[in-house]
Amino acid sequence: MSWGAGVIRYRAGMRRAAITLSHPGPPGPRHVELAVQGSVLSRRWWTGAGKPRESAKTFGDEHGARDALEKETRAKMRDGFVLRRAADAAEPGELVFQCMVRGAGGDLFDLHPDGRTLAIGATPHDPRRVEITVIDLPTGARRPVHAESGRIGQQGVWLQAMAFDADGSRLVFAVNGETRELDLGSGETRVLAVHDLRTINPFFAQPCWDAARERLLLFHQDRVRVLGPDREPLFDLPVGERPGFRTATLSPSGRLVALTFGELSQVEIWDVQGGGRVLAERFPYPPGFTGAPTGIHRLGFDPEERLLVAGGPHLAGWFAMAADTGELRWAVADSQVTGRYQSCGDWAYSPDGTVAAMGGWDGVVTTFPAATMRRTGTAYLGGWPCRVRRVAFSRDGALLLIGDDSGRVSVHRVAG
């Protein structure tokens, strides 16, 4: 079955008419207010409780003024300014927070269980160095928690994934083929796994948690492994001798592991407890579909573990198959072009499983009622257009986080 796109669209392509940005300092909080009226871009800036200064510039038309506003917004955000707004003061669908990650795409982030602390990963000045920083959303204040540089002769340091644990005291991250755990209290790290880069591509095969963040799937040597709450091994599957391994994912309950292989998009589901394979099928694309030339690189379960969902930047569509039979359950049609399927950079389900959010290559994030996957309305938000790389919900489902190719990370209040 094929449906059109969905309920609320958080759009990065609409030019905004005004924005207020803040920088927490040091030496003190700074603020910039930009606004467009007709062809005029006006600026107000001040420090702390000081008196604002003002300036204005006239452009050829309103389009030019709005372009200048977006250009200056990007420049200020790269210098550490952020957009912030109290979540309870924001309308459903509106921005609560927005920042830029320097030297990296906007997919390296995670929200703390407290809902007010954002961790971001970046390569701000040197491709041979990575940094992990936490940001307090209400104030925009930043605190570096980890940094490292490449070894002599190493081409670069690549941070591939990061996520808080269940209580937010530790951060699991992947860097250059190693999965590590960072204790945010002490700053100490330990290596959990080191995988074979000849067999496993760390840009596709990345560590992931179950919904409770108690079980952790990672890649060690040429094996897919699941660890328990005390980091004890629960599941271990060799994949190195099998050609074309792409990625693996853990189900929300932590009971199942799904894997993909090869250009033919072979999918397997394994039982963690028993260690046996429960499904082996080629992914059932719609008839005539040719948009998966290199197979599936992004795979995930729905919250009820009835569906296995495929999408991502190397697949020209967004599809779901039944986890028990391997049959196609839905395929989302492109909302603009007849006969094509919706491009998908990333997707996520809300914690209660009622909403699915999908980020497209056009900079639009669309939410769907998971039960029907049918369109019922749209809403658009300000920003500049850029391909979406990551979508995630807060653990209470109240916030939707979006990261894109420009390095921008946006936090929206979820529309009811």
Image (cartoon, rainbow, N blue to C red):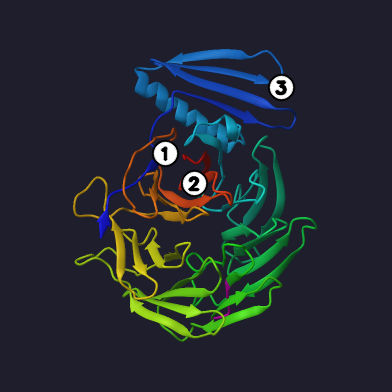
Q: Is residue 84 visible to us here?
A: no
Q: Label 3 amino acid?
A: Gly
Q: Label 2 amino acid?
A: Ile
Q: Which residue is mark 2?
A: 402
How crowded pointer 3 is (Cα within 10 Å; few <14, some 14-19, many 20+) is rated as few
Q: Which residue occupies 31% across, 65% down?
A: 329
- The reply to whether the C-beta atoms of the residues labelled 1 and 2 are less than 8 Å apart is yes
The correct choice, above or below, for 342 with respect to 87 in the image is below
- As drawn, the label of residue 12 is 1
The numbered mark, 3 or 2, whose residue comes first in the sequence reads 3
The numbered mark, 1 or 2, whose residue comes first in the sequence reads 1
Q: Which residue is mark 3?
A: 48
Magenta stretch: give its range: 218-222
For residue 276, side relative to residue 285 (left or right): right
- As drawn, the label of residue 252 is none
For residue 215, side relative to residue 299 (left or right): right
Of the pair 134 and 252, the residue shown nearer to us: 252
Q: Is residue 205 visible to us here?
A: yes
